[in-house]
Image: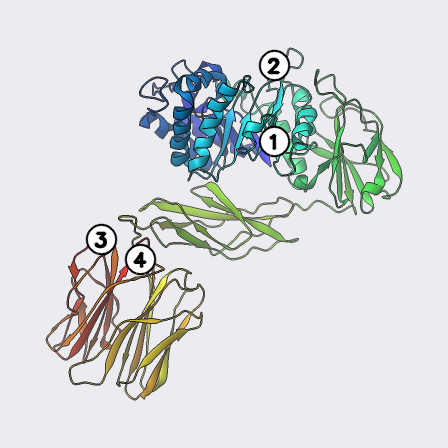
Amino acid sequence: MIVGDSPQSLIVNLSETEAAAYFADRQANGFNSAWINLLCNTYTGGRSDGSTYDGIVPFTTPGDLSTPNPAYFQRVDDMINLAAKYNIAVFLDPIETGGWLSTLESNGATKDYNYGLYLGARYKNFPNIVWLNGNDFQTWTNPADDADATAVAEGIKAEDPNHIQTVELNYDASSSLDDLNWAPIVSLNAAYTYYPTYAEVLHAYNQSSSVPVFMVEANYEFENNTGMDYGSPATLRRQEYWTMLSGATGQLYGNHYTWSFISGWQSNLDTPGVAQLQYVTALFAPREWYNLVPDQNHAVVTAGYGTFSSTGSIGANNYLTAASTPDGALVVAYMPTIRTITVNMSKLSAAVRAQWYDPTSGTYSSIAGSPFSNTGKRQFTPPGNNNGGLGDWVLVLGANGVSIDTQPPTVPTGLTATAVSSSQINLSWNASTDNVGVAGYLVFRNNGQIVSTTQTSYSDTGLSPSTTYTYTVEAFDAAGNISAASSPATATTLTGASGASTPAFVQAAAIQVTSGASVSATFANPNTSGNLIAAYVVWDNSGAVTLSDSLGNTYVSAVGPTKYSGDKANAQIFYAKNIAGGTNTLKATFAAAVTSYGILYIHEYSGISQTNPVDVTAASSGSAASMNSGSAATTSAVDLLFGAGESNNTVTNPGAGYTARSTAYGNITEDRIVTATGSYSASATQDGSAWVMQMVGFKGAGQ
C-alpha cells in the first residue's frame, strides 16, 4: 500500500543532513514513499537555473540535456540512497513538465530520448525507484509536447525495463491512461484531481483490469488549489478514504511546507494531516485492502449513499464510498456526513461483527446488537459526531466476527550472505512461523527493500565489484503484519576483471581410509548452487577411481592420474561444475580396494565459470625437497590456480603466493588467484622424499 509524501524539491533545497532528518521523521510516521523531482526550477520550489541550495547545476551547459553534471547527479544518487536507508521508495520525476517542458522542446526528441537512456543506465540498479513522469502536463494533447515527454520515458525503459513507470497528466482531473501514448509505458495509473477523489480513482480503476491505480496528487494540507476547499483535516480525510475505497493501491499526501521546503517546514512535519494518514494506514493495512472491490453499483450499500459528482467542492460532497472483498469476509464504507444507510447483509459470508471507526482518532466503537445475521438488509446510523466534532465515520463489517490478525510472524533467523561473483550475492535464511501463516519475506539491502519473495533464499544480482553490502530480512503475513528485521548479514562482492568474476574459496574437508573400496567426505556447510567443487584423490594402487556425491553432481577428471616414478600409487584432481546446492557428501570409489591409504580432499569455490571452467593443467613428479607441477600458460583474465601435492612423507609449506587449504595426512592442497595471463605453476616444499604435484587453472565466471 502506497503511503506517500510529496517532498518535490528535496534534492535542490535540502542538505543531506536535513534530508536524513526529514526521511527519519517520515519513516517514523508510517510513510513508505516520496515524490521527488530529479530536476527542480521555480515551478517546483527551486531556482531558475535548477541549481541546488549550494550551487550545483544539473547540466554543465545550461538547458542541454546531453551535458549532465556529475556532481549534481551524485547528489541525486546520494539522496535516493538516503531514502532507501529509511525504507522510502522514491517516485522520481526525471524531468517534470510543469517547469521543464520548454527544455524538452528545445532539446528535441532525440536528445530527450538520450537523456532517458542516461537515466535508465544510471539508475537501473537502484531498488527504491518508481519513475513518475509529467507533472501538471497540461499540453499532453499536443503531439509534439507528448512526443518529447514520452521520449524520455522510452529512453529510460530501453535501459531500465524493470522499474515501474507512471505519468501525471493535467489538473484539475486526469489519469495516466487518458493518454493512449503512455499506455505501453506505464504500469501504474496515476489519478490526479482536486475534485472528489472517488470519481477520478474509479475512472482510472475502470480503465484497466491489470494496471493498478493510485492517487498521485489531490489537495495538499494548508493549501487551497481550487478556491473551494482548503487543505484542512476534514478535506484530507475525505480524499483519503474515498481513494482507498475506490480501488486505489494507495496515495501521496502533500503539505504546503514540505513540497517546496519553505521557511518553517521543520515545525510543520508532524501535522494533523500526517496523524490522520496514520489512521488510514492503521485501518487498512491489517486487512485485505488489496482485495476490496468498489461498490460501484450500490449492491452492498443500497440506500443512503448520497450524491456522486466528478466536479465541485470536496467539503460540500456527501457521497459514500464502500467496498467489499469477493469472499464476503469484509465490507468497509466511508460516509462523510451523518445519515442512515442500508446495507445488504447477504453480501457477507457469515455472521457479521459491526464497528464504527473514527477517522479523527483511529479508534473503534462496537455497534449494539453485533454480531448480526448475514441475511436481509440492515440500517446503520453513526453514533453522533466523531472525536473531531464532525460527522464522518467508517463502517467496518467483518464476517464471523473474527478479530483482526495483529500478530506478526517470528523474526527470520540464520541469514547468510555469500558473494559468488563480482555482481552476485546469494542469501538464505530459516523460515519464520506465524499464528495464521507466513505470506512471504521482504529482503533489504543497505536498509532499502529490494524484493518480496515467498522463498527462504534469494540471489541478489547486478551488484558492483569489490563492494560490501549488508542485508536483513523481514517476514510478513497475509494481514500485513511484518516482523522485526533479522540480524544483518554482510558480504563483499568479488573483484572483477575484463568482465570476469574473481573466484573465492568457500570451504574444504579431508578424510582417509586405510583399507576398503571407497572413501567419503562431507562438507561442514551446505553447498551453494552454481559453485564448483574441486576434489583431490590419493590412493595406493594403479586401479581407477570414480567420484559421486549425494546431490547428483557430475565429476570430471581435470588432471591425472599421476604417480611417482616406478610407483603404483596415484593422485588425481576432479571437478564438478555448476553444482546443485545443499548438504553434500562426496564418495571416491576405487576399482581396486586400497590396502594402506585412500585419501579424499574436497573443496568448494564460488565465482568459477559454470560452463567451461578448466583453463590449463600441469602435473609432474620428482624426489627433491622442492615440488613443482611444471608451468602452464593461462588464457583467462582471472584464474583460480588449484594445486595439489602428494609426498611419500610430509609436505611442509605451500608455494609462493599460494594459500594452503589442507595439509592433512602429509599431503597438501592449495590455491591462489591470478588476474593476468602468464605462465604459472603450483609448488610446495617437503622433506626430500618422492612426490607428485598437480595444478588446474579454473576460469573465473564470465569467461
The quadrant in which residue 282 appears is: top right
The quadrant in which residue 182 appears is: top right
Disc 1 designates what residue?
214
Marks 3 & 1, CB-CB < 8 Å contact: no
Residue type at mark 3 is Thr
Quadrant location of the N terminus in the rendered image: top right
The residue positioned farthest toward the top in the image shown: 227
Residue type at mark 1 is Phe
Counting residues from the start of the chain, the first of labels 2 and 3 encountered is: 2
Marks 4 & 3, CB-CB < 8 Å contact: no
Disc 2 designates what residue?
225
Residue 675: mark in rendering:
3
Disc 4 designates what residue?
504
Task: Tell me the CA gap for discs 1 and 4.
Answer: 46 Å
Helix, strand or loop status at disc 3: loop
Look at discs 1 and 4 and give the one toward the viewer.
1
Task: Tell me the CA gap for discs 4 and 2.
Answer: 60 Å
As drawn, 240 above or below 468: above
Marks 4 & 2, CB-CB < 8 Å contact: no
Quadrant location of the C terminus in the rendered image: bottom left
Residue type at mark 2 is Asn
> x, y percentage for residue 433?
59, 55
Counting residues from the start of the chain, the first of labels 4 and 3 encountered is: 4
Counting residues from the start of the chain, the first of labels 3 and 1 encountered is: 1
Q: Is residue 223 left or right of residue 462?
A: right
Helix, strand or loop status at disc 4: strand
The local crowd at label 2, few if under 14, some if 14 to 19, many if 20 or more residues have their Cα within 10 Å, is some
The local crowd at label 4, few if under 14, some if 14 to 19, many if 20 or more residues have their Cα within 10 Å, is many
> x, y percentage for residue 554?
39, 70
